[in-house]
Image (cartoon, rainbow, N blue to C red):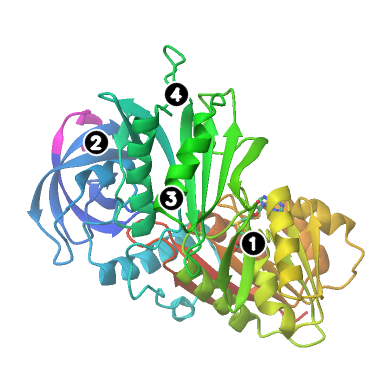
Amino acid sequence: MINEQLKIGDVIEVEIKKIGINGEGIGYYHKLAVFVDNALPGEVVDVKLTELYETRGVAEIINIKVSSPDRLEVKFPSYDACGAYSMQHLTYKRALALKRDILVNALNRYVTSKIKYAMIKPTIGMREPLGYRNKVSLPVRKIDGHNKFGLFAKGSNEFIPVNDTPVQNPRINEMVQALELIMDETGFDAYIQKDKSGFVKSVVIRRGHFTGETQVSFLLMKHDERIELVAEKLVQKFPEIMSVYEFLTDNYKEQVFFSTNSRLVYGKQTINEKINGQTFSLYPESFFQLNTVMADNFYNKMRELANLSKDDIVIDAYAGIAPVSHYIAKDCKKVYAIEIDQRSVQSAILSLKRNNIKNVTVLQSDFTKALKNLEEKSIDAMFFDPPRTGLGYETIKQVLKYKPKKLIYGSCNPSTLAKDLEMLLKVYDLKEIVPLDMFPYTPLVESVSLLVLKDE
Ligand SMILES: C[S@@+](CC[C@H](N)C(=O)[O-])C[C@H]1O[C@@H](n2cnc3c(N)ncnc32)[C@H](O)[C@@H]1O
C-alpha cells in the first residue's frame, strides 16, 4: 500500500477535487483523502503532510502548480491564520457557488433518500460583501508596552493582533484602534496573568447597522475606576456610543466574553437596531445575527417559504430576540417564541412590546422541554434556527409528536442540518433549500429549508 509508506513531512502532489466543510480543498493521493487549507478545486498543488491518519491526511501548500482562475492574491495573511477573513484567496462569485457545493456535499454524506439537486437553490450573496460584521469580540494583550486587541490562531493559543479586519464594520475598526490608544493613555491596561497586573480581558463592541447606536462591553479581571474615564473619552470621540458596560470575572482561561456580574457604566441598558421597519432592543448578551443585511434576507426567505395562513398556530424555536416572530406575526394567528437565554428573552419581550405585536408569547425554556409541556395541541408550522449543534434525535422525536404541516429550518451548519434531515425526511418531503451568505469570506454556510408533511 502506497499510503502506508507515507509519513508526516512528505511532500506529495495532489489535484484538488472539491471543497470541504471548513473551506479546505480536498484532493486524493491514491486512496488517501488530503485536506489542504487555502487550496481550490481544480488546482494542482505540491503539499507537505502535517497530519496523517488511516484514510485521510492534512497538508499545507508548498507550491501551486496549476492555479485556479478564481484565485485572488492574499492581501492580509494574518487574517488567514486566525480565520477572520479566511476565504480572501477566492473570488466572491466562486465562493457563493462553492458554498452551495459545501451544502450538497453534506447532504450527499448524511442523507440516504434521493434529493433532487434542483431543490438546492443558488446561494444568495451580498452586493457589498465587506464591512458586514456588526459586532467584534476581541481579547486584549500587552505587546511591547502597548494594549493590542486580536484573535487566536486557528486551533492554538497564539495571539495575533487584529484591529482592522476588512469584514468588520469600518467604524467598529476605528473604535478598536482608538480604544487601544485610550487604554495606553489612561493605564487601563490588559490583564497579565503572570503578575496579575492590569484589568481588561476582552471587549465586545456591537453597532446597530441601520441606527449606528453602539454598545461597548468590557470583561474585566478586576474593577478599576479608570473605566469611567475610558468610557468618557470613547463617547467624546464616538458620540454614537449609547451604552458602556463592565462585566467582572475571575476566570482567565475560559474563552467567554460576558459574566453574570455586570454593571452599566454609561448610557442606556439597550441599544436599538432597526430592520423590517421594526425596532429591536439589544442587551450586550442578547443574540443578534452578525450580519444585519443578510439577516433581513434570511427572515424574509423564511417568511416567504412558510407562506402562512391567517389561522395558523406557529412555533418560532431557538427564537433569540424573536426576529422570526416579528417577521411572521401578521401572517398568522398565534406564535410561541421559545428561547433558553434570559437576556435574549428580555430583549424579545421588550422589542415585541415596542413594535406593538400582541399575538406572540415568549417562553423562556429549552425547546425540547417546552414541546413536552406546551398546552397547545396542534401546531401548523415550526420555524427552527438552532445553534451549530442542530436539532438532534430527542428534539426531533418531540417535533414528530406534533407533526406540523410545515417545517422551516434555518441552519448555520450543513452537517448537522443534513443529519437532522436524514431523520426528518422519513416523515417530511424536502421542497427547497436556499443557501445564504451570512458570513462572506468565511467557509460558513447559512441556509433555509422548507419541509412539508408527507401525505399519510
Ligand atoms: C442561531 S441563534 C438564532 C436566534 C434567532 N432565531 C435569530 O435569528 O436571531 C440560536 C438561539 O438558540 C438559543 N438556544 C440554544 N439552545 C437552546 C435550547 N436548547 N432551547 C431553546 N433555545 C436555545 C440560543 O440562545 C440562541 O439565541
Disc 2 or 3, which lies upstream in sequence? 2
Given this view, does label 4 or label 3 mark the residue nearer the observer?
A: 3
Q: Residue at point 32% right, 38% down?
A: 181
Q: Residue beneath label 1, please?
A: 281
- Tell me how far mark 4 sits from mark 3, CA to CA: 25 Å
Taking depth in this image into account, of 409 and 154 the one nearest to the observer is 154
For the residues bearing labels 4 and 3, Cβ distance under 8 angstroms: no
- Tell me how far mark 1 sits from mark 4, CA to CA: 31 Å
Taking depth in this image into account, of 412 and 62 the one nearest to the observer is 412
Is disc 1 placed on a helix, strand or loop? strand
Quarter of the figure with the N terminus: top left
**Crowding near the residue tagged with mark 4, few <14, some 14–19, many ≥20 C-alpha atoms within 10 Å:** many
Image disc number at residue 191: 4
| Quadrant position of residue 72 | bottom left
What amino acid type is highlighted by mark number 3? Gln
| Relative to 80, 138 lies left or right | right
Q: Which residues are magenta?
A: 1-11
Q: Residue beneath label 2, please?
A: 3
What amino acid type is highlighted by mark number 2? Asn
- Tell me how far mark 2 sits from mark 4, CA to CA: 48 Å
Disc 2 or 4, which lies upstream in sequence? 2
